Image (cartoon, rainbow, N blue to C red):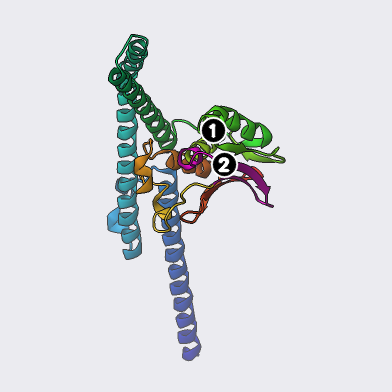
């Protein structure tokens, strides 16, 4: 009889210990979920957790989330400061740059010596370069910080291609470059305004490096998930070791240093593509030209 009592007590003790263990595990999991939910919402505050009650795992997770939250807030603060700085620079330089270009144009209307005309033309080119740089920096900064949002919708591709070609037809003619753009078919999911900006950057890049008498062609290819807009040129091509870096902000390869530009067009194009769930690829061989492909999702993600 005594053996049965001892056995019963042991079984009850085992059940109680198992229950307590399960309760502690459930409480731990609940507290971990609470921490993670707070971190996902962005309002994790270490002070809200009583460290004296934390298990070793809870304590380590709390410290990790605290460090991650501080890091994210610091990064966002830095981005906000950069955005504010770029906005201030844009505002402060807008009037001086406009006046610089205005007075340069007035100067070009005056009787000048050949050297004076060259200097006026150089001033005009530098003023335009400065204006383009400020505009590109503002666009990139606002995209990065989310001040400007993209609104992709299912849209036909033909107007997108036609709009980009219309903007660069004159430049291609002046450089004696053949610009080909067959009728684009199909549709994709994209923001028309910003995607045209990206496509124009790719087209401008192609015309910039294609020599007189060359050819630039825009084509569209449909895949099950993406539509690819390709901009192909027969310029000098890009060395293989430079290709992973060309989409970096302000990066300019050795060959690019001899041409006008600030090295932000491809960076901005990639930002626009990625903000819409797309991406950009480049295929190039030295002496064989380059093909930049802008991939846009066929459906809204």
Furthest residue toward front:
114
Task: Tell me residue 56's x, y (percent).
Answer: 31, 64
Q: Is residue 206 above or below residue 85?
A: below
Q: At 33% across and 18% down in the image, what residue appears? A: 117
161 falls in the magenta region: no
Residue 141, quarter of picture: top left
Residue at image mark 2: 216
Residue at (37% x, 47% y) in the render: 255
Which residue is at the front of the view, 74 or 184?
184
Report the front residue among 23 and 43: 43
The magenta-colored residue range is: 206-233
Q: Is residue 249 visible?
A: no
Residue named by callout 1: 172
Do labels 2 and 1 touch, CB within 8 Å? yes
35, 296: nearer the viewer:
296
Q: Secondary structure at mark 2?
A: strand
Residue 285 rendering spot, x and y as whole percentages: 49, 56
Using the rendered image of the protein, determine whether residue 74 is visible from the camera's viewpoint: yes
Tag 1, which secondary structure? Answer: helix
């Amino acid at each position: 009889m005594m053996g049965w009592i001892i056995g019963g007590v042991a079984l009850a003790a085992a059940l109680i210990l198992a229950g307590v263990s399960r309760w502690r595990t459930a409480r731990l999991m609940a507290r971990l979920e609470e921490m993670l939910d707070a971190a996902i919402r962005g309002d994790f505050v270490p002070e809200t957790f009583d460290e004296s009650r934390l298990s070793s795992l809870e304590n380590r997770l709390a410290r990790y989330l605290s460090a991650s939250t501080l890091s994210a807030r610091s990064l966002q603060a830095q981005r906000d400061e950069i955005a504010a700085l770029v906005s201030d620079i844009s505002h402060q330089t807008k009037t001086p740059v406009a006046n610089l270009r205005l007075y340069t144009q007035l100067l070009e209307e005056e009787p000048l010596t050949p050297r004076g005309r060259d200097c006026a033309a150089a001033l005009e080119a530098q003023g335009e370069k400065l204006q383009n740089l400020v505009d590109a920096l503002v666009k990139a900064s606002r995209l990065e910080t989310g001040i400007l949002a993209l609104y992709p919708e299912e849209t036909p591709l033909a107007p997108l291609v036609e709009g980009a070609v219309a903007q660069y037809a004159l430049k291609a003619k002046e450089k004696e470059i053949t610009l080909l753009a067959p009728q684009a078919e199909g549709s994709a999911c994209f923001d028309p305004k910003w995607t045209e900006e990206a496509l124009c950057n790719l087209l401008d890049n192609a015309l910039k490096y294609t020599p007189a008498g060359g050819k630039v062609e825009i084509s569209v290819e449909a895949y099950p998930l993406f539509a690819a807009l390709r901009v192909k040129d027969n310029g000098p091509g890009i060395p293989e070791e430079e290709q992973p870096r060309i989409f970096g902000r302000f990066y300019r390869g050795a060959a690019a240093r001899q041409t006008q530009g600030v090295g932000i067009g491809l960076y901005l194009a990639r930002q626009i593509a990625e903000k819409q769930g797309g991406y950009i690829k480049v295929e190039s061989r030295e002496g064989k030209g380059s093909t930049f492909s802008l991939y846009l999702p066929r459906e809204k993600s």
